[in-house]
Amino acid sequence: MKLLIFRTTTIFLLPLLLLFSIFLLLRGHYLPGSGFVGGIIAAIAFILHAFAFGLKNTRKLLRMHPLALMPVGLALAVFSAILPIFQGLPVLTVLWLDEPFPVVGLIGSALLFDSGVYLVVLGVALTIIFTISETV
Amino acid sequence: MLLAVMSGFILASIVPFSGKLLRGRWSFMTTALPGALFVYFLTLIPSIANNQVRLFSYQWVPSMGINFDFLVDGLSLLFALMITGIGTLVFLFTSAYMKGDAYLGRFYGYLSLFMGAMLGMVLSDNIFTLFVFWELTSISSFFLIGFNNESKASRKSALVALAITGLGGFFLLAAFALLGNITGTYSIREMIGSADILKAHPSYLLVMVCLFIAAFSKSAQYPLHFWLPGAMKAPTPVSTYLHSATMVKAGIYLLARFTPVLGNVPAWNHTLTIVGGFTMLYAAFHSIFKKDLKEILAYSTISALGMLVFLLGLGTSEALLAMVVYIVVHALYKASLFLITGIIDHETGTRDINKLSGLRKVMMPVSIAGLLAMISNSGIPPTFGFVGKDLIYASTLESEILALSLTTIAVVTNMLLLYAGILTGVKPFTGVLPESFKEVHLPDWRMWLPPLVLGIAGLILGLFPVFIEGGIVMPALHSMYPMAPPFHLMLWHGFNLILGLSAVTILGGLLLYFLFKPGLRHQTWMAKLYGSSPEHIALLFSRKFRVFAAVWTRLFQNGYLRIYVLMIISFLTVLLAYKSFTQVAFYINPAKISPLTSTELVVMFILIATVLYAVYTPSRLAAIAAMGVIGYCICLIYVFYSAPDLAMTQFAIDTLTVILFVLVLYRLPKYINYSSWLIRVRDGLISLIFGTLISILALEVLYEPTNKETTRFFTDNAYTLAKGKNVVNVILVDFRGMDTIVEITVLTIAAMGVFALLKLQLNKYDQEL
């Protein structure tokens, strides 16, 4: 009975938490929140799922090994860092789009960078927790 | 010039991957590089005539004053020509000697790495690039000595050599840092200008000692000489090139280069004379008792290096001239002898002088080369060796103090060296050819030509010393001794005392050779002497040090997490307590502390209660849950003091940590109390003291004047420069973006580490099951 409630809640909580994590990521530049917190909250969402439905199902849901998220995130961050070089600007200069994006607002390469952080943190947290819960 | 120095490194990075292409008949193609460089340096000779210098400057790290400043003067060109000239012959020799070796490409790679490093070292005017190249020569020497990496003796010798020369490298860096500090420049040329300041400086002795240790370790002076005989485990081309002709002269070069900067001071001269004099006698004495050709050569090389240091110590214009000439003489005959040894070893399979004889019948050109090398070594006219030895005697005779004893030492050393020269250059070729060597044949021309060329060069230079006198020798002398009077190298000075001494040397050496045969008695005698040799003491020290290291590690790295934590906390406590009692004026101003609100009081109360609960609960899970509550309480405090970002992150992290702990601890057996009450009291006391100290520290920090400039910059510019309103996030992704990149990289590495460690463990368990 307990498990049933837990599972049902998780089904609703997972997308909500993921949405919340992305929300934190996007608003980070203006209001409290950032890629780091976003990544951790996303990780918590998946871990919750793993508790409710078992690790195997979570892995299926994730479709990829969490290890694979880290290089992608790192590459995104580094890419956003070296992007300015092509415009003759120093590394890590933030470039901004001229037009504000609907809903999200003004978008710059800082968001790309933060998304990289998000993915790395998600990957790191999931890798560590998944590995430990599988092995111990 | 930059290309000339770097070409060695470029070749070194290409050759190992050439595979079969260079292993076969094309292997001698690599000779083209040192050959071309030799020609290039020859063309530079006119530019240094009349004691001029040429400077090639390339920027590297201009902000720190470190640039590739290549200075071509007599001294550096002399060494550059030796490095490339002998390099050419060694490269050629190698192509036949190491034919078919599976790792020939790698071998050539190390050799050209060494050549590049050595060239860079002798040409550098900047002390820090000199240091870098100096270390590179040590490293390439390490790789080459350990080239036969399957032999344990090779590996050990390589490590010993690296340890000794690496030790010297540390002292060199120290000496250079001091020199740079005192003179305010990193250029040796400019240091000459402040030579007087340096000599009067209180740190002069320190600089001198550091420089001496560096030079003595590299140039195998007593008591740091013992790595050189061990280095003979390397293939013979390496012994020829690195350990007799060039690399071991790096220390000599260093001393010569710094003679105008630091030299001509009694402490400098006397130390060098004593160390050099002792080394040359000690090593020459040892060389005559050895049986292995290469070992004899190793000790006679040490002796020759001692001679060079000795001459540098005398420091007069004649002595320095003798040194320059002797460098050339020694490089020519010693390289030749080493190559001959290599041929003998390659063809007969032995280097034992008692087994070798009569080889002239099967390898005539080699025996001619051996004879030429021997007579140059012995200083028999008309070779260049005779010119060199004449100059040595001239300079010892004119020494202001102890002229007689110094001359005697030089004569005795030369007699012993002559003995060693006959053993290695002549003895294997004379006498009856044993039955077992009937099959031995003359090797490929690429092997016998190089020693012959070197021998003939020694002869030609002896007959016509004018060939190198104006072009190389005088400029080289000038760069060490700018006031040197003009001098002419001559074969014949007429009948005088010096000629008499030469005759005594030759006769004495020959007599020694015919009358003295080292026997078993001498062997046991030498073995007894070994107990007091520096090599024995160093090895003993390294063994004892290993025991000490094991004890030390067991004490501090015992593998118990609780002991680590205890150590760290206790150390910090002691440090903090010491600092706060001795240096901090302790006071609290109650007016500055904001009043407690009721919500804060409630949170504090919960915090304290959960801490006590976490300590006293008998259940692990409960303790972890309590830790989680503590984390959340801290989050609340963050919220009260308006740090929402911190609070949010702390909140998420705490949740994750609790999950992590639950995952790990869930499977552990039921909670059992392992620690006695005494240990608990001890731990409680330490944590109490530590907590109190941290609280004091936190309170004190409030009263320290802080620099708000950074804070103001970030808050003022977050929106204008980075278009963000959340300052914390702007700092993370924009102002300190590089830090964040590094941090996420570290995170990734940590996660991969966890993954790898745990998975590895799993496999191990599987195997055990």
Image (spheres, grey):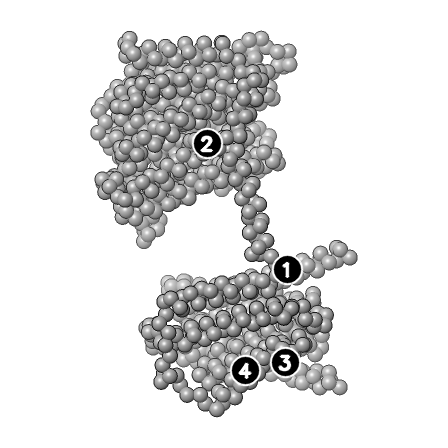
Question: Which numbered circle lies on residue A14?
Answer: 3
Identify the mark nearer the N-term, 4 or 2: 2
Identify the mark nearer the N-term, 1 or 2: 2
Expressed as whole percent of the image width and height from the top left, the position of residue B726 reads: 43, 79
Badge nearest the viewer, 1 or 3: 1
Q: Are marks 1 and 4 on the same chain?
A: yes
Q: Are marks 3 and 2 on the same chain?
A: no
Expressed as whole percent of the image width and height from the top left, the position of residue A88 reads: 37, 63
Question: Which numbered circle lies on residue B225?
Answer: 2
Q: Is residue B216 above or below residue B436?
A: below
Residue, disc 1? B757
Q: Secondary structure at mark 1?
A: helix
Badge nearest the viewer, 4 or 2: 4
Q: Chain of mark 4?
A: B
- Residue B80 is at least partly visible in this image: no
Q: Please state, as top left, top right, bottom left or bottom right, where the C terminus of chain B lies in the image.
A: bottom right
